[in-house]
Image (cartoon, rainbow, N blue to C red):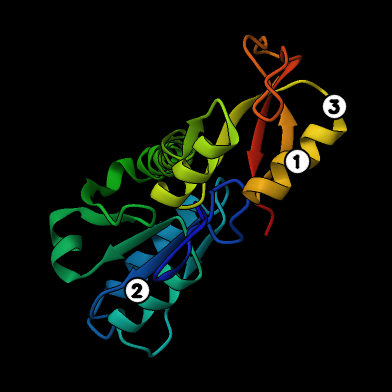
Amino acid sequence: MTHGDDNGLVLPPAVAPIQAVIIPIAQHKQGVLEKCREIKAALENNFRIKLDDSDNSAGWKFSEYEMKGVPIRIEIGPKDIEAGQCVIVTRHNRQKETVPLVNITEMVSKKLQEVHCGLYQNALKNRENRIYFCTNTDEIIETLSKNGDGFVKAMWCGEEECEDGVKEKTGVGSRCILEEEKAAGKCVCCGKPAKHLVVWAKAY
């Protein structure tokens, strides 16, 4: 779910077909499209850039590229040109920042890195907040009923019979054995000494 929200895709910069889109504001005014083309030329050797100079409104373009998950949007209009600046909007959190045009290449690189790191942190936080440690099958049922779907860490003796038993009782199946974490405790199903710490979850 990290790569989408209610407005569409949210793509990581590394895989996004368009890393940044330039949206002219009041593009019918003199000098706006020329400046946008100048910015595109300055960026396209380092990034996957698109300039949308279609006749659609700026608001329509904002929505379209949000839906497509383009990591950053560059907005520039007559007042921005006069001030030697532009506005950069990051897709994953919709934060806006006004930046000087002289630093546009460095700022685009910085913002793409912010999107990458922001998406990772959001995914990590979501995963950590949805992991629960349980010691028996009743706890698994109660925990998932209370918190909704998520991941359960629980001990397992290594017997297939117990693995099937957990799934039958709780509806979650084994997903992976955490080799880096030592098993210490009793099997969540039979109560015998555990051999593995396992992540359990529902299949979709």
Type of amino acid at the residue the image marks with label 1: Gly
| Residue topped by disc 3 | 159
Is 22 rendered above or below residue 161?
A: below
Residue closer to the observer: 34 or 167: 167
Mark 1 surroundings within 10 Å by alpha-carbon count, few (fewer than 14), some (14 through 19), many (20 or more): some
Q: Mark 2 or 1, which is nearer the eye?
A: 1
Q: Give me the residue at 22% from left, 70% from top.
A: 77
Residue under circle 1? 165
Mark nearer the N terminus (2 vs 1): 2
Q: Is residue 179 above or below residue 62?
A: above
Give residue 130's position: percent from left, percent from top: 46, 40
Q: Residue at x 46, y 44 (%)?
A: 142
Q: Residue at x 38, y 43 (%)?
A: 111
**Observer-nearest residue: 168 or 17?**
168
Amino acid bearing label 3? Glu
Q: Quadrant of residue 88?
A: bottom left
In this rendering, the label closer to the viewer, 3 or 2: 3
Q: Earlier in the sequence, mark 3 or mark 2?
A: 2
Q: Which mark identifies residue 62?
A: 2
Q: Earlier in the sequence, mark 1 or mark 3?
A: 3
For this rendering, which residue is in front, 95 or 82? 95
